[in-house]
Image (cartoon, grey):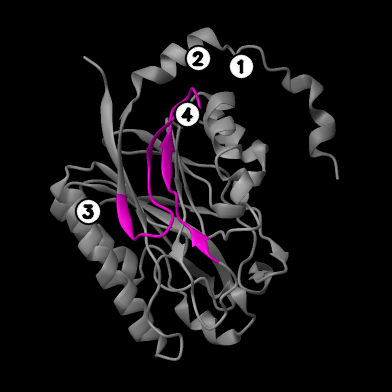
């Protein structure tokens, strides 16, 4: 019998004015996502991922210490604790990307992974941190990740996380495959005119090169007052053959659902023996400074 896992991606926009308190911004974003999580549960989604820093706007459009107030510890913080309760309530695995406080003044762009029984399994910290115009001033907010490329053994599948700008780097995508990922989720915040032409090239290529499924998530809409561009949505799932099997709209908040047949991983890898035919002893120059 095929091993099929129903997965979901949430693409949304932050509509609360940034002039409001950080508490209200965060509360409104969480309330919006709780409704979408309920929708996912009603559709029998088993693994669900939200977008990058889902608790507010993509504040990296400016450099302001005000946004340091969005940080929370993981897993002790209120958002992850709430999501643990929600995961257990619905029997759903949740990938929860938030702004993490490790120590005072040491912050990461992180995703917590929670199993369907509410257990906190661990976290992934974004490795590759952009700092470039227009409006991607991430080094002001985030320290580069230092936890490697973990794979989390959930009830339904072994999953990895790669966050936004990470997707431009094939090395981590390969590491996730070698570590046993069956599905890799990439929560993102990316705008038209910059990366859109790569959106459906890079990640299907990672899926093919590594023989796993990918769930790619992007925001929708415009976030004021910065209006750095249109977050173009189009969240999708693709197979180990690079085929997109479920896709969201360009401009609508929605839940994207895909049924992933994990048996395809073995089928593909038995045809394309990329892991067998690797030559790691010849790649040393790739990791030289």
**Which of the two marks, 2 or 4, is nearer to us in this view?**
2
Q: Is residue 232 magenta?
A: yes
Q: Is residue 18 left or right of residue 260?
A: right
Q: Which residue corresponds to mark 2?
A: 269
Give residue 180's mark. 4
Give residue 263's mark. none
The answer to which of 67 and 43 lies nearer the viewer is 43
Q: Which residue corresponds to mark 1?
A: 274
Disc on the earlier residue, 3 or 4? 3
Q: CA distance from mark 1 to mark 2?
A: 7 Å
- Is 77 situated above or below 116? below
Under circle 3, the secondary element is helix
Q: CA distance from mark 1 to mark 3?
A: 36 Å
What span is in magenta?
Answer: 230-255
Residue at horizontal 20 percent and vertical 47 percent from the top: 117
Q: Quadrant of residue 5?
A: top left
Few, some or many residues within 10 Å of mark 1 (<14, 14–19, 20+): some
Few, some or many residues within 10 Å of mark 3 (<14, 14–19, 20+): many
Give residue 87's mark. 3
């Amino acid at each position: 019998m095929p091993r099929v896992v129903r997965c979901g991606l949430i693409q949304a926009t932050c509509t609360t004015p940034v002039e409001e308190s950080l508490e209200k911004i965060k509360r409104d974003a969480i309330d919006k996502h709780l409704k979408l999580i309920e929708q996912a549960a009603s559709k029998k989604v088993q693994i669900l991922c939200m977008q990058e820093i889902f608790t507010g706007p993509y504040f990296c459009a400016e450099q302001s210490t005000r946004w340091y107030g969005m940080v929370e510890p993981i897993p002790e913080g209120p958002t992850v604790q709430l999501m643990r309760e929600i995961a257990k309530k619905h029997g759903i695995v949740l990938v929860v990307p938030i702004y993490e406080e490790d120590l005072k003044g040491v912050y990461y762009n992180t995703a917590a992974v929670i199993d369907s029984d509410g257990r906190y399994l661990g976290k992934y910290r974004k490795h590759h941190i952009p700092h470039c115009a227009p409006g991607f001033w991430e080094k002001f907010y985030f320290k580069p990740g230092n936890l490697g490329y973990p794979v989390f053994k959930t009830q339904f599948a072994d999953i990895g996380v790669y966050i936004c700008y990470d997707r431009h780097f094939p090395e981590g995508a390969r590491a996730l495959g070698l570590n046993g990922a069956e599905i890799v989720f990439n929560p993102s915040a990316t705008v038209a005119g910059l990366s859109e032409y790569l959106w459906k090239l890079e990640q299907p290529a990672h899926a093919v090169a590594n023989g796993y499924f990918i769930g790619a998530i992007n925001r929708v809409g415009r976030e004021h007052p910065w209006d750095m561009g249109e977050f173009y949505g189009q969240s999708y799932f693709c197979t180990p053959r690079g085929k997109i099997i479920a896709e969201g709209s360009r401009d609508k908040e929605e839940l994207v659902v895909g049924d992933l047949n994990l048996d395809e991983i073995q089928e593909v890898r038995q045809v394309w023996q990329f892991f067998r035919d690797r030559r790691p002893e010849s790649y040393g120059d790739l990791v030289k400074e």
